[in-house]
């Protein structure tokens, strides 16, 4: 029987691929079920600003309007949806297609990419840190792409044939978008040094990709596809499934659905931008709900500073009215998973 292995510290568990559970189980095993359920059924749709990316670098009034939209989105809910971002629809269709093809391969083939024990890269599911942990209804393929020294090529898929090429092309395109956004974010906050966030990315920023499969789940009322979390990244780029919704975000104590705009990039601030902006841009708490009938696939790309780089609130965003809110930190991502599993938000540990 194909399985994905998860092990950490004293806990070692063998988890079956959710894809297999989904086809075989009428009821999910206990460890997937949240005792208090997911807190409702009818969640409102969040009004996420739709950003015309092509106008961001223009000094025209239309351009300025978009810059302001970006500021409002990131400061209010932590999200924008970018359209006209310059990545062709046909290429995004290929990204979706190859992702679906990978997850449709026979289990034996996918297991060639299985995540080794105590590693993040590879095909698998939730890492189990404790017996009490509720597990996510999700199979995923994690691949570090940048810097090259962090690539674990052993778990990069040989099939489908174009997968690796697509991954390199997709992440290179997103890196360019990320650079423009980081400059625009500084501009939107009227910081003198528009490179201030980019500089904190350091010499060797990291790019991590995560291909998600969320199979149908018979208990959408009590099983989450991804538990509530804030991203450890600086910035996250998500290509949502074009047909099946699932992403929800918390705003003022209420869960909202993040709507689908086919081929838009859902962009959210991660914890490290919340730190760099001294709390002005919010790293949203979000989660993914399950669907009883339909499978969902998404692709998330996390852009993060060099792990040796010091991340801290930018000088231009600290003053008497707004004192420094966070301590500086090195390798936030490296320490993130440990504190996340204790139930505390890692970013809260850095608050002054
Ligand atoms: O798949 C989604 O909709 C969101 C995924 C996500 O939040 C993540 O991978 O961090
Ligand atoms: Fe996330």
Image (cartoon, grey):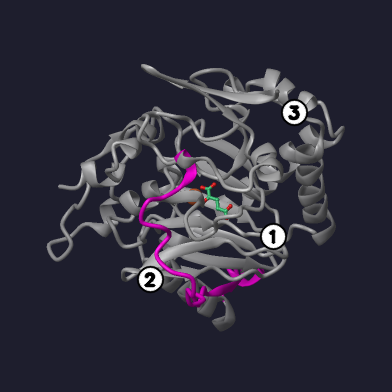
Residue 24 at least partly seen: yes
- CB contact under 8 Å: marks 2 and 3: no
Range drawn in magenta: 31-59
Mark 1 vs 3, N-terminal side: 3
Badge 1: few (under 14), some or many (20 or more) residues near its Cα, within 10 Å? few
Q: Quadrant of residue 286?
A: bottom left
> Residue 29's spot in the image, x, y percent?
52, 40
Quick one: SS at disc 2? helix
Seen in the image, is 206 located left or right of residue 161? left
Crowd band around label 2 with a 10 angstrom C-alpha radius: few (<14), some (14–19), many (20+): some
18, above or below 323, in the image: above
The Cα atoms of the two marked residues, 1 and 3, are separated by: 23 Å
Extreme bottom residue here?
61
Q: Kindly identify the residue that appears in the image at 73 percent across and 38 percent down.
A: 167
Tell me whether the residue at label 1 lies in contact with that at label 3, contact meaning CB atoms closer than 8 angstroms. Answer: no
Q: Which residue is mark 3?
A: 110
Q: Quadrant of residue 24?
A: top right
Left or right of 224 in this view: 107: right
Closer to the eye: label 1 or 3 = 1
What is the CA distance from the residue labelled 2 to the residue labelled 3? 40 Å
Give the CA distance from mark 2 to mark 1. Answer: 33 Å
The circle drawn on residue 293 is 1
Q: Position of residue 35 (x, y in %)?
A: 37, 51
Which residue was labeled with disc 2? 76
Using the image as rendered, state which of residue 347 and residue 75 is in the foreground: 347
Vertical arrangement, residue 160 with respect to residue 286, above or below: above
Quarter of the image where the N terminus is located: top right
Query: In the image, is residue 78 part of the stretch drawn in magenta?
Result: no
């Amino acid at each position: 029987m194909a399985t994905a292995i998860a092990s950490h510290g004293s806990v070692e568990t063998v988890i079956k691929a959710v894809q297999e559970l989904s086809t075989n189980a009428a009821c999910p095993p206990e460890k997937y079920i949240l005792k208090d359920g997911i807190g409702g059924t009818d969640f409102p749709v969040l009004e996420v600003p739709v950003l015309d990316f092509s106008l961001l670098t223009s000094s025209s009034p239309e351009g300025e309007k978009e810059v302001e939209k970006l500021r409002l989105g990131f400061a209010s809910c932590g999200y924008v949806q970018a359209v006209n971002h310059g990545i062709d629809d046909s290429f995004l269709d290929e990204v979706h297609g190859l992702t679906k093809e990978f997850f449709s391969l026979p289990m034996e083939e996918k297991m060639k990419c299985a995540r080794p024990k105590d590693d993040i890269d590879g095909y698998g599911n939730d890492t189990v840190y404790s017996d009490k942990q509720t597990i996510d209804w999700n199979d995923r393929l994690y691949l570090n792409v940048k810097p090259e020294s962090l690539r674990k090529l052993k778990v990069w898929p040989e099939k489908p044939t174009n997968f690796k090429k697509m991954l390199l092309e997709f992440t290179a395109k997103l890196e360019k978008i990320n650079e423009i956004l980081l400059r625009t974010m500084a501009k939107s906050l009227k910081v003198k040094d528009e490179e201030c966030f980019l500089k904190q990315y350091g010499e060797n920023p990291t790019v991590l990709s995560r291909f998600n499969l969320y199979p149908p789940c018979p208990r959408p009322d009590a099983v989450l596809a991804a538990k509530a979390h804030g991203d450890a990244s600086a910035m996250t780029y998500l290509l949502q499934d074009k047909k099946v919704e699932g992403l929800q975000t918390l705003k003022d104590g209420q869960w909202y659905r993040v709507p689908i705009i086919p081929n838009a990039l859902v962009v959210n601030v991660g914890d490290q931008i919340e730190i760099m902006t001294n709390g002005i841009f919010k790293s949203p708490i979000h989660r993914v709900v399950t669907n009883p009938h339909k499978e969902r696939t998404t692709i998330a790309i996390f852009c993060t500073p060099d792990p040796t780089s010091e991340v801290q609130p930018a000088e231009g965003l600290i003053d008497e009215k707004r004192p420094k809110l966070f301590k500086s930190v090195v390798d936030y991502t490296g320490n993130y998973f440990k504190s996340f599993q204790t139930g505390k938000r890692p970013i809260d540990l850095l608050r002054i």
